[in-house]
Every structure is written in C-alpha cells, then in structure tokens.
Amino acid sequence: MTAANHGRDVFEYALLRVVPSVERGEMINAGVLVYCRAKRVVIARTHLDEARLLALAPAVDVEGVRVALGAVEGVCLGGERAGQAAGDDAGRRFRWLIAPRSTVVQPGPVHTGLTTDPEAEAERLLDLLVR
C-alpha cells in the first residue's frame, strides 16, 4: 500500500454469470466475487433473479443454479464448505473460482479497484451490477 491509496487496499472482482445455453450466449449476472490480498479474504455475494432467468430460459434448472451459486459461496468461506479447496488460501480459492469453465454458472473478466472495506465493496458491486 502506498500513501497515495489513503488507507485503501487493492481488490479484484469478477461477476458471476448464469449462462443457461452456451450456444445462445445469453446470460444474466447473478453474483460477484471479491478478493483482497491485503485482507486475505475472498467474498461471494449472490442474487438470483429467478423471473428474469426463467424469461431467458424457461426450462432452466433453477434449483441447480442455486446449488452452483451456493457452492461458490462455500468455496469463498473456506473450511469444510470449500470441499477440496478447504486448505487453500483466499488467493488460490479466488483464482480457482475465476478460471474459465463451460458450466451454467461462469465467472466474468477480472477487474480491479481500491477499497477500505472488501465486504462493503462486495455489497456495493452486487447492488450496482446484479440487483
């Protein structure tokens, strides 16, 4: 951290997107991942707009999407809920979560910023980009 940051730490974030049909390329934002190395924290905040998702893909497995989003939250929390990533530090869990994949829940590109409070930043981004 430099004095020019005014007590703020660098953080990275990525959107979590629901892509019910990869072939169509349509998606909705359903969450955010926030990683702050200085605070040693990775945070997931999710919000699934079920009506919007069903309008996009009436046959989508909504419960399956909710389970997948819950799994992402579990990996961020670490410990037993993180499964195989339980022993990994926050940075490794974040990198694993943002790795490209061809599942219904996919990460978007990573962006950066400065924050004094990664938890509040996750809520702000969820309100701004998802809700």
Image (cartoon, rainbow, N blue to C red):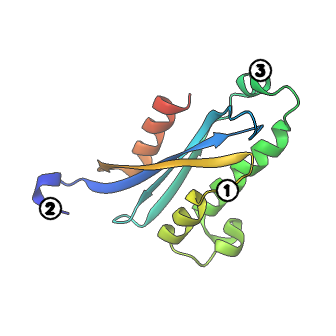
Residue 37 left/right relative to 3: right
Q: Nearer the viewer, mark 3 or mark 1?
A: 1
Q: Quadrant of the N terminus?
A: bottom left
Label 2 vs 1, first from the N-terminus:
2
Q: Disc 1 on helix, strand or loop?
A: loop
Q: Residue furthest right?
A: 59
Q: Are marks 3 and 1 in contact (CB under 8 Å)?
A: no
Give the percent coordinates (x, y) of residue 9: 28, 57
Residue identified by numbered label 3: 55
**Distance from label 3 to label 1 (Cα)?**
24 Å
Residue at x 59%, y 60% (from the top left corner) = 99
Q: Which residue is mark 2?
A: 2
Residue drawn at (33%, 65%) of the image: 38
Q: Which mark is residue 42?
A: none
Q: Amino acid at mark 2?
A: Thr
Q: At which x and y percent is residue 16?
A: 60, 44
Q: Residue furthest bottom?
A: 87
The three-letter code of the residue at mark 3 reads Ala
Question: Looking at numbered disc 1 in the image, what kind of residue is underneath it?
Answer: Arg
Location of mark 1 (residue): 101
Give the residue displayed 56% in from the left and 57% down from the top: 98
The foreground one among 60 and 66 is 60
Picture mark count: 3
